[in-house]
Image (tube, helix red, strand yellow):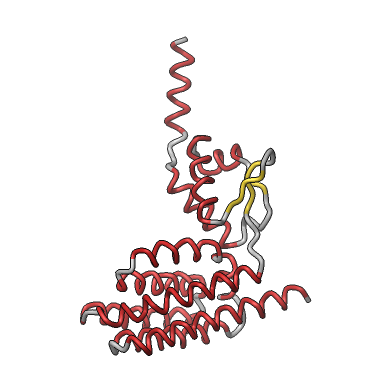
Amino acid sequence: MASTMQSSREGALKKSTDSAAVVAGLREAISRGDLVPNQRLIETDISNEFNASRATVRAALAELTTEGLVERIQNRGARVRAVSVAEAVEIIEVRGALEALCAAKAAESVTDEDIDELRSLARTMTEAVTSGDLLQYSEWNKTLHRRLVELSRQETAASVIARLRGQNVRHQFRLVMQPGRPSVSLSEHVDIIDAVCARDPDRAAAVMEQHLKSVAEAIVKAGETSRR
């Protein structure tokens, strides 16, 4: 009995990864395409991969289901949820309305210190595209959108946007790899930063909405290309 209890304690110590780390790891694997749409997610495999308990894995899958990245099928377990091009465009359109609002609010409340931060981010994003570091540019892209939402202080919009971004993460990750797309995206992001830093809420809203309309069009184009 004592040996069994010791073995159980050792197993618990070995399975130490928390739910947040498993969520982050699976989310990244989905965004990169390592886990593809409709792929089954086996709890035992995930537990071994992340050194996490089965309970932790189940909690992580539940969170990803709430985010819309994973779906559970009765009697068949969990799998990566497939987001169609039509749904991806719809998600972007909703984000366009919400993030336009956030950009306008950010322009109204931005401080001199915030402006310095945004200008620095524009330079960093430009350097990433110029050097061809597209993965890093993708990360700075997400940072900019997240920061503008934070500056807007629109908490309800922030929670909705975060969930929508999660559902579309794979489509947008693929966009950054399209030839010529990063340069277009960079120009649009710089326009957004310029409008916010100029404290022009109307222009900030307009250029943000136009940027996300451009993203939707690029997703449609990518979908058409993949079907050929």
Left/right placement of residue 43 relative to residue 207 reads right
The answer to whether residue 17 is left or right of residue 86 is left
Q: Along the line of sight, which residue is nearer the eye, 57 or 199?
A: 199
Q: Is residue 71 above or below residue 85?
A: above
Name the spot of residue 96 as percent of width and height, x first: 48, 77
Image-based side of 75 in relation to 1, left or right? right
The quarter of the picture where residue 77 lies is top right
Residue 6, x across and y down, in percent: 43, 18
x and y percentages locating residue 93 in the rendered image: 53, 75
Q: Quadrant of the C terminus?
A: bottom right
Closest to the observer, 214 or 95:
95
Identify the residue at image location x=42%, y=79%: 100
Q: Disc count in the image? A: 0
**Residue at image point 62% right, 46% down:** 72
Residue sitting at 69 percent across and 41 percent down? 76
Identify the image quadrant of residue 88.
bottom right
Is 75 or 225 nearer to us in this picture? 75
Q: Where is 24 relative to 205, above or below?
A: above
Residue farthest along the left direction in this orientation = 112
Given the current orientation, which residue lies at the most extreme right position? 228
- Looking at the image, is 141 positioned above or below residue 63? below
| Residue lying at 44% horizontally and 82% vertically, measured from the top left | 208
> Residue 103, how many percent across, how many down?
37, 79
Question: Would residue 97 be found to the left or right of residue 72 on screen?
Answer: left
